[in-house]
Image (spheres, helix red, strand yellow):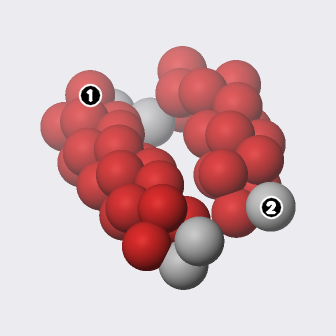
Amino acid sequence: DILNQLEKQYDVIRSKTHLIPGDKMQEMFDNYMKNKENSEKSAITSK
């Protein structure tokens, strides 16, 4: 399940956030949210 994989990846990213500068973190978070939206959309359309 793609969403579960994303959630896991994000948890890993979050656990490492203290190593990542704020700007980079924001960019990664934006990408994560976009990916999440896209996979939710494709999950809906593929039904």
> What numbered label is drawn on residue 22?
1
Disc 2 and disc 1: Cα gap in Å?
A: 29 Å
Most foreground residue, 2 or 12: 2
Residue plotted at (54% across, 21% down): 18
Most foreground residue, 17 or 37: 37
Q: Secondary structure at mark 2?
A: loop
The residue carrying mark 2 is: 1
Q: Is residue 35 visible?
A: no
Q: Secondary structure at mark 1?
A: helix
In the rendered image, the vertical position of residue 29 relative to residue 42, given as above or below: above
| 8 left or right of 40 in image | right
User: x%, y% of residue 6?
Assistant: 65, 52
User: x%, y% of residue 39?
Assistant: 48, 63
Whichever of callouts 2 and 1 sits on the residue coming sooner in the sequence is: 2
Quarter holding residue 12: top right
Residue plotted at (26% across, 45% down): 30
Identify residue type, mark 1.
Answer: Gly
Quarter in which the C terminus is drawn: bottom right
